[in-house]
Amino acid sequence: MDTHSPEADEDLARARAGEPSAFAALVRANQGSVYSLALRMLGSKEAAADLAQDVFLQLHLNLQTIESGAHVAFWLRRVVTHRAIDKLRQRPRFEIASIDDEPEIAAVAAPSDPLLQRHLQALVAELPSAARAVVVLRYQEDLDPLEIARTLDMPVNTVKSHLKRSLSALRERLGTTSPA
């Protein structure tokens, strides 16, 4: 989502002027990243698709506040993570799901160990919502702690604390449990 091009600036300007094809170009340029981030946060294809649709609707309603093509990517990432955290807070703490409902992650290379990959996804899904957002932004979106702090409106030291505690917890859980 953080690729910036002169075309993005042009599409934004045309979308602000009310040109539907320009807004469609903005959506196409960002839909994979928005959906993938939502899927990683929520763990459900349906919830991720719904969230992505809501986020793009909000983008359309807020086009006049977006400063540039680069700002579009930042704005989308920020809205997706905040909305996903809100949705996660509304969910019951634990859900029972069929193994057949296991989500596939978009835009990820085939893992070398699918059982370990699935187990790690399940462990990340158990993290508290803010910690999960930090881990997903760090390791899916490849953002540094400063960018994560800006995206989530939290101090950099809080981001670093979430990363340190989350990684320690994941390492501990991986060391004490085995993939099912």
Image: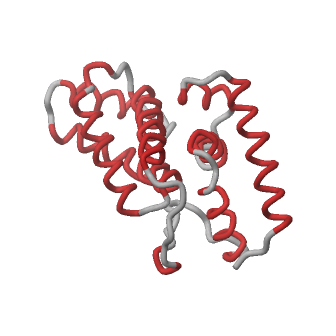
Report the side of 175 relative to 89 (left or right).
right
Viewer-closest of 127 and 156: 127
> Residue 45's spot in the image, x, y percent?
40, 63
What's the colour scheme?
Answer: secondary structure
Q: Residue at x 76, y 55 (%)?
A: 170
> Residue 128's spot in the image, x, y percent?
61, 46
Q: Quadrant of the C terminus?
A: bottom right
Report the side of 129 relative to 76 (left or right).
right
Report the side of 31 relative to 126 (left or right).
left
Q: Is residue 123 above or below residue 97?
A: above
Q: Residue at x 48, y 80 (%)?
A: 100
Q: Residue at x 69, y 76 (%)?
A: 115
Q: Quadrant of residue 20?
A: top left
> Residue 107's spot in the image, x, y percent?
52, 60
Q: Residue at x 77, y 42 (%)?
A: 165
Viewer-closest of 76 and 89: 89
> Residue 34's spot in the image, x, y percent?
42, 47
Q: Is residue 11 above or below residue 45?
A: above
How many numbered marks are there? 0
